[in-house]
Amino acid sequence: MCSVACVFFINPQSPTRLRSFITQTHILASCCASVEMSLNGRATSFLFTEYQYVGVFMVAFAILIFLFLGSVEGFSTKLQPCTYNVDKMCKSALANATFSTISFVLGAVTSVISGFLGMKIATYANARTTLEARKGVGKAFIVAFRSGAVMGFLLAANGLLVLYITINVFKIYYGDDWEGLFEAITGYGLGGSSMALFGRVGGGIYTKAADVGADLVGKVERNIPEDDPRNPAVIADNVGDNVGDIAGMGSDLFGSYAESSCAALVVASISSFGINHEFTAMCYPLLISSVGILVCLLTTLFATDFFEIKLVNQIEPALKNQLIISTALMTVGIALVSWVALPASFTIFNFGVQKVVKNWELFFCVAIGLWAGLVIGFITEYYTSNAYSPVQDVADSCRTGAATNVIFGLALGYKSVIIPIFAIAISIFVSFSLAAMYGIAVAALGMLSTIATGLAIDAYGPISDNAGGIAEMAGMSHKIRERTDALDAAGNTTAAIGKGFAIGSAALVSLALFGAFVSRAAISKVDVLTPKVFIGLLVGAMLPYWFSAMTMKSVGSAALKMVEEVRRQFNTIPGLMEGTAKPDYANCVKISTDASIKEMIPPGALVMLTPLIVGTFFGVETLSGVLAGSLVSGVQIAISASNTGGAWDNAKKYIEAGVSEHAKSLGPKGSDPHKAAVIGDTIGDPLKDTSGPSLNILIKLMAVESLVFAPFFAKHGGLIFKLF
């Protein structure tokens, strides 16, 4: 309760004499540390509660994997003909079931650990960023960015290390059966993404319920500052940033990395790399990620050591330069890896035939994915940064109220889909033309090769946001809050860029996994004119809407309870508005916790059960249609939702900052245009932080799950059609 007392007594409404006494440096540092401990403890408590429920699911689904895959050959321990080379004998179905289950558990545990460690790093960094803001915006930037970089390197190295060790340990048993080995490894990607789904959805519901409740009552109705300690939902809001935007986002990008690696390894195992047992060439996807870590390590020095941030307007360019520098350096790194690790010529499996590919062609596949990611990042920045006309137009629309703000924001989101889709389409066409499905898989890896830098600038945003919240709760000077707000505004844009990378890579990963599934399920072609496939397309295209509806309604229901609770406290607690009484933070935290735990189950079940039900009862052809439909519609909705929410958020901050004459004409805080902007921001919160980011997990997770269960679906699937 130390932090609660600290927050209460340092309220700006407290008596002047007391306030002047406790704003001494050492008292402020102690108070920030107390608030940090409170946020850390509550975030840790929530994650432990969430992981208890997720752990039950993990065990149950691991049992399903073992039972489904083991039953393919009646739990036989005998060797069986290989899928792609029937003249060769591979390990038994029981072995595949056992090792797929183990790799699933390893992927799930690694994902959970990645999210948890990321959250711990962020909570420790929040108060330190606030205290450094007293010395200037440059010092605060360095702390926030380095903290995000620690998380980025930790996650990238953690995922790579566990995957490499798993491959080598499994290789002891599988020996020369590389087809079976890397088919079992796909469980690693499934485990990573399944945990990421629950982390993203649960954390997103938690943070957005609190955020919406705090903004609607605090800002709009009571006209008090953001993160004001008088607001009962303020602690839940700041805790939510850590469990949703940090832990959930970390698990999400880990899942993307794991799945893209698994997709590339599966295709490579049945190509000349696997047939000829060329282990170095086989590990080409892992070598790309390894070089990416080294490149990102060098890139971070440009933001923290080679150039010094002195002015607010230097923050966003410094973060953008991280993307440009890492992309340029990584292009050179990819060329070196392609030249050293790959033979001059080799063959890649392409739907039953071996396609001859040159090493320079594979370099171009990775490079085009890398540069397509940069294009998506900059287009996302253009549509979500308040430095450009799209967001400024959205802010200007607030003159006439919230309705026009919503109309302009939705139009911006729809329009922002165009160029990213063309970038993804060109990447797919070029990479497939050069190296078939393997080319698409490594293109996705290219987009994710700078994941450490992407995570650094992504995690930087929530850290800066929480630093501003701590500054407000600790009653620090207005100048410090302005500095943290400047950091946060740049962080909102970079967070949107990170989501763009995640969604773009998800499209490529899903397509690569889809190709691997079609090959593994022995489907010669996917004909959309076939009724089985077409109905799958329709259902698959509908699933992202169903999923979005569930997550949006979950946030809305939780936010409704939060708004009612915050209103109740303001109406029934005497002296709360005056700062002479303290709010009941614990009750608001409980509302967010209960809602997120309860509401994350149905969307998660929808995603996890759909491939099982469709594959078992309707067969692999219908399931292929479902995967294609969900991929096509899911990517569009995810980009639109993320960019719309980001634009509304930065339109609000554009008015609040009041830097330009145009922005000043819309402000100040509390004006009618500002209130309209706050309403748009609250509508966009679940779009950009719950539904949008979760959709990229949906399309990846369904694809990798279908690949893992492909042997069972191919053998026993389509029960309904077999009856007729």
Image (cartoon, rainbow, N blue to C red):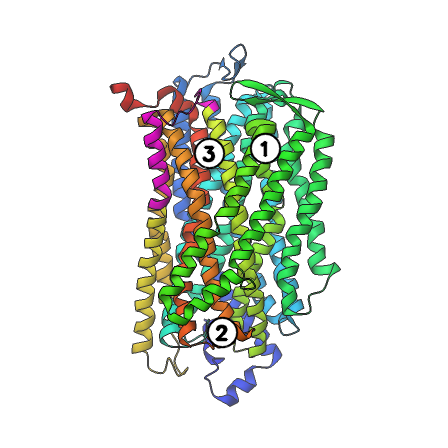
* First in sequence: mark 2 vs mark 3: 2
Q: Which residue is mark 2?
A: 473
The image position of residue 253, as x and y in percent, is: 53, 46
Q: Quadrant of residue 610?
A: top left
Q: Is residue 122 left or right of residue 330?
A: left
Q: Earlier in the sequence, mark 1 or mark 2?
A: 1
Give me the residue at 39% from left, 41% from top. Answer: 57
**Residue 700: image tag:** none
Q: Which residue is mark 1?
A: 431
Give the quadrant of the N terminus.
Answer: bottom left
Q: Position of residue 477 (x, y in %)?
A: 56, 79
Which image quarter holds the C terminus? top left
Looking at the rendered image, the disc whose residue lies closer to the viewer, 3 or 1, is: 1
Q: Amino acid at mark 1?
A: Ser
Alpha carbons under labels 3 and 1: distance apart: 20 Å
Location of residue 567 with respect to 148 vertically, above or below = below
360 in relation to 36, above or below:
above
* Residue 61 in view, yes or no: yes
Secondary element at image label 2: helix
**Magenta part of the chain:** 519-546
Q: Is residue 537 magenta?
A: yes
Looking at the image, which is closer to me, 563 or 522?
522
Labels 3 & 1 near each other (Cβ < 8 A): no
Residue nearest the viewer, comparing 572 with 616: 616
Q: Residue furthest left?
A: 724
- In magenta stretch: residue 92: no
The numbered dot on residue 704 is: 3
> Mark 1 falls on what kind of element?
helix
**Mark 1 nearby-residue class (10 Å; few <14, some 14–19, many ≥20):** many
703 or 63, nearer to the observer? 703
Dot 2 surroundings within 10 Å: few (below 14), some, or many (20 or more)? many
Residue type at mark 2 is Met
